[in-house]
Amino acid sequence: MNFLFVLFCVHQVNSQSTNITHVYSWEDALNAHPDSVRNLDCSHQKWDSIPVQCLLFKNLKSIDLSFNKLSQLPIWFKEFSGLEVLKLNKNKFSVLPIELCSLSHLQVLEINRNKIEIIPECISFLAELTRIDLWDNPIKKIPDSIQNLKSLKVLDLSGIAFSRTYQEKLRLLLPNTKIVLENPCNCLD
């Protein structure tokens, strides 16, 4: 009986250790087998464009491109169709890149502290999104199509000034979503 218990415990430990996810740095990823790279940290690289070598990593589930100098995504970025987590914080985007709209499995999008003013209507194509962090961007309006994101649990709009009327409109569009907002401003809708 004790022998079976020990075998069970060893199996549980081995099973749990295979679920641990490794995050590769850019340098480590270039030296690894491309199919093994599922999580990639390319933050703080000072890139103003994403190297085409990223296409080697066909199995990416998450990529962190934060703290770079990116202002757009390459057209080939849509090749990361299995991407679930994308971090584009603290770059130089002024528009939410339309290339994101083809990432149908995306669940988490962090693109805070950029210069984004426009959110395209195609944001509604990202049906699996559960979290969007857009805080500290000069966004003027969120498209009504965002109401089609039925899986959305959190929309972080901290640091963005919206009127009380506009905040109420957002809450009506997304009644099942936690919307993080600043105190309403005395500004026009």
Image (cartoon, grey):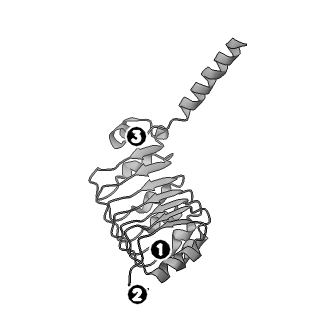
* Secondary element at tag 1: loop
78 or 71: which is nearer to us? 71
* Amino acid on which the number 2 mark rests in the picture: Leu
Is tag 2's residue or tag 1's residue first in the polypeptide sequence?
A: 1
In the rendered structure, the answer to whether residue 126 lies left or right of residue 44 reads: right
Alpha carbons under labels 3 and 2: distance apart: 46 Å
> Dot 2, how many residues are within 10 Å of its Cα: few (below 14), some (14-19), or many (20+)?
few
Residue assigned mark 3: 24
Residue 106, position as x, y percentages in the image: 53, 57
Is tag 3's residue or tag 2's residue first in the polypeptide sequence?
A: 3
Residue assigned mark 1: 120
Q: Quick check: 141 above or below 3?
A: below
* Amino acid on which the number 3 mark rests in the picture: Tyr
Residue 112, position as x, y percentages in the image: 38, 62
Q: Quick check: 89 above or below 4?
A: below
* Amino acid on which the number 1 mark rests in the picture: Pro
Query: Picture quarter containing residue 74?
Result: bottom left
* Secondary element at tag 2: loop
* Secondary element at tag 3: strand
User: Depth-wise, is mark 3 or mark 2 nearer the camera?
Assistant: 2
Is tag 1's residue or tag 3's residue first in the polypeptide sequence?
A: 3
Residue assigned mark 2: 188
Query: Picture quarter containing residue 30?
Result: top left
